[in-house]
Image (cartoon, rainbow, N blue to C red):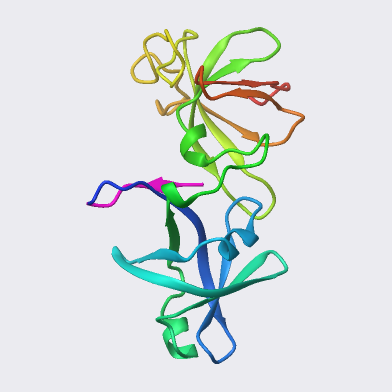
Amino acid sequence: MKSSKPENNTERVLLGKIVGAQGIRGEVKIYAFGDAPSDFTKYEKAFLVLRNEEKLVKIEKARIQGNLAVVKFVEIADRNAAEELRDAEVFVEAADLEELPEDTYYVRDLEGLCVIDDDTGEDVGVISEVIQNAAQDVYRIVLNAFGESEGKGKGKGKGKGEGGAQDDSGAPKEALVPAVKEFIKSVDLEAGTIRIHFIEGMR
């Protein structure tokens, strides 16, 4: 899950995005990032961010509809007001988050991890972004040129700047890895590393 820090420096985590209105009483449909539309039943308040404007809202009730959460905010009274929230990102404060199940992680914890090739032990790069979509998350990895990285791992080397691998256009060379057990072998947040099994052509 993506995180942000507003002006008061309180870290917030992105749970989903409003994709439309539901009914006539002000409910909204939210696409939940990750695998947890039920998250919206656990919180009392949220922060809506749309076009760089932020609105604090109270969650009156929430229910699950397929892979969407249908949420009623106290401040949103009718369908017109709900429609105006389309494309708003929905954040909650990190301090309000519940402990995640085993083998589940927040985006804020994954981005910056040093990537280790599980087969060779080579330090191959850093997770630069977690791409979230309807199928499964995908890890975008900035690859190293010389087996050095500046991720969260302890005792790492130069980093992903000038020493990083580049493609023919001079842009940093990247790999995209689906976040499935076939490829993701272990995550050690304390050490700041993630071990990945790469198949031919993946990097």
Inspect the magenta stretch and tell me whether residue 4 lies in it: yes
Closer to the camera, 101 or 165?
A: 101
In the image, residue 74 lies at what x, y percent?
A: 44, 80
Left or right: residue 199 compared with residue 54 = right
138 relative to 195, above or below: below
Residue drawn 45% across and 28% down? 112
Report the magenta residues as a range: 1-7
Count the marks: how many? 0
Closer to the camera, 65 or 57?
A: 57
In the image, residue 2 lies at what x, y percent?
A: 46, 47
Residue drawn 47% across and 90% down? 78
Left or right: residue 110 compared with residue 163 = right
What's the magenta bit mostly, secondary-structure-wise?
loop
Farthest left residue?
Answer: 7
Inspect the magenta stretch and tell me whether residue 38 lies in it: no
Farthest right residue?
Answer: 182
Q: Quadrant of residue 138?
A: top right
Residue drawn 53% across and 25% down? 189
48 relative to 128, above or below: below
Q: Quadrant of the C terminus?
A: top right
In the image, residue 29 lies at what x, y percent?
A: 57, 74
Left or right: residue 177 compared with residue 162 = right
